[in-house]
Amino acid sequence: MKVWFNPELFNHIAISVAEYRWSLLLWSVFAFILFVVLQYQIETATPMFLIWVALFILFAALQALVLAAFIFFFQVLPSSKIHDKQWQKFYRAIEWCEALIFSFILPLPALLFVYAVIVV
């Protein structure tokens, strides 16, 4: 059975974009700080454009954080470094759980932003 996601595919993707992990993490922190500053501005004056910018910044920060976490989780697969069969099975099970979780989490911030745009 061919699956669209697996730990090896995620590992390959994470290795190919590993150089961006720290910049994504820093952009995420910067965007969360900017969101907090904009929230203060929105409390004093509430133009609709400022609310949409704040929502976009929040979801962009969440997406950058999820992408950085993805790279950190899949840059090195622990099962490829272990030679003991029992530990290798254990690590493979964990890697498959991480792959399943990230296959749902990766598109989630973008989908939530699209949902917010449609509903609001």
Image (tube, helix red, strand yellow):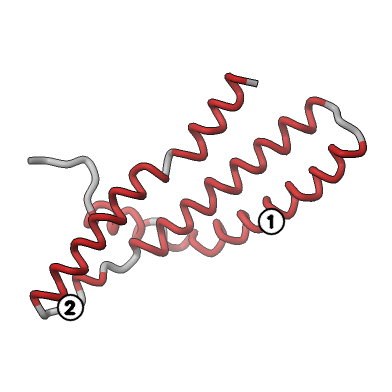
Please tell me which residue lies in front, 16 or 82.
82
CB-based contact (under 8 Å), mark 1 and mark 2 = no
User: On the picture, is 112 further left or further right than 9?
Assistant: right
Mark 1 and mark 2: Cα distance apart in space: 37 Å
Which quadrant of the figure contains the C terminus?
Answer: top right
Residue 44: x, y in percent? 92, 38
Task: From the image, tell me which residue sits under label 1.
Answer: 30
Tell me which residue sits at (11%, 40%) in the image. Answer: 2
Pinpoint residue 81: horizontal percent, then vertical percent: 20, 76
Location of residue 115 with respect to 85 vertically, above or below: above
Residue drawn at x 53%, y 54% as measured from the top left? 65
Figure quadrant of residue 87: bottom left
Which residue: 29% across, 48% down? Answer: 100
Q: Earlier in the sequence, mark 1 or mark 2?
A: 1
SS class of the residue under badge 2? loop
SS label for mark 1: helix
On the image, the x and y values in percent for residue 62 come to 56, 47
60 is higher (above) or lower (below) than 22: above
Q: Amino acid at mark 2?
A: Ile
Give the quarter of the image for residue 73. bottom left
Q: Which residue is mark 2?
A: 82
Q: Is residue 120 left or right of residue 78?
A: right
Graded by Cα atoms within 10 Å as few (under 14), some (14 to 19) or many (20 or more), the crowding at tag 2 reads: few
Q: Residue 75 appears at what percent x and percent y? A: 34, 64
Q: Residue at x 7, y 40 (%)?
A: 1
